[in-house]
Amino acid sequence: MDSDSPSLTLTSTELRGVTAALLDLIEAELGTTITLDADHYWQVDGRSAFDLSTTPTIVVGQLADDVESVRAVMSTGDLVLWHDLEHLTGLLRRLAVLSSPR
């Protein structure tokens, strides 16, 4: 597929819509306060995740750090796109695990 393929493009409106719908569902299924029941996790480094010609670098993430980052953004409003998306990704992956069938 080339980069102009409709399946390889996404609008911010689409992303905003699905994110809002998922957040509503998270609240409905997991509640307004979510116990994460884990802390450290494995993740593929973002820089190597999309380069299938090499073995990806595995790094350790920490949910406590991710939560702290979210709370810092909420209190200051300061965002660094790549950095805060990395923290959000860790939290979203944990929510996916918590909501998946056992």
Image (cartoon, rainbow, N blue to C red):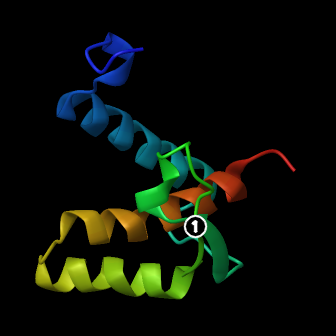
For mark 1, give the secondary structure: loop
- Residue drawn at (62%, 63%) of the image: 94
Q: Position of residue 36 (x, y in %)?
A: 63, 74
Query: Is the N terminus in the top left, top right, bottom left or bottom right quadrant?
Result: top left
**Looking at the picture, how far across and down is residue 85, in whole percent?**
33, 62
Counting from the top left corner in percent of width and height, residue 8 is at: 35, 22
As rendered, which of 19 and 43 lies closer to the eye? 43
The amino acid pointed to by label 1 is: Thr
Query: Measured from the top left, where is residue 54 in percent x and y?
Result: 57, 52
Q: Please give the residue where the numbered disc 1 appears in the rendered image.
A: 57
Query: Is 15 or 43 nearer to us in this picture?
Result: 43
Left/right placement of residue 40 relative to residue 85 reads right
Q: Is residue 14 left or right of residue 30?
A: left
Q: Residues within 10 Å of mark 1 (few under 14, many from 20)?
A: few
Task: Work out whether residue 86 or residue 44 is closer to the camera in this orientation and state it.
Answer: 44
Query: Position of 99 compared to 8: left or right?
Result: right
The residue that appears at 87% across and 50% down in the rendered structure is 102
Looking at this view, name the residue that lies furthest to the left: 77
- Taking the spot 26% from the left edge, 38% from the top edge, the residue there is 16
How many numbered discs? 1
Q: Answer with the quarter of the image where residue 78 lies.
A: bottom left
- The quarter of the picture where residue 55 lies is bottom right
In the displayed structure, 82 sits above or below 3; it is below
Q: Is residue 49 above or below residue 70?
A: above
Task: Please tell me whether residue 31 is drawn above or below residue 2 in the rendered image.
Answer: below
Residue displayed at 41% across by 71% down: 87
- Residue at the extreme front of the image, as rendered: 53
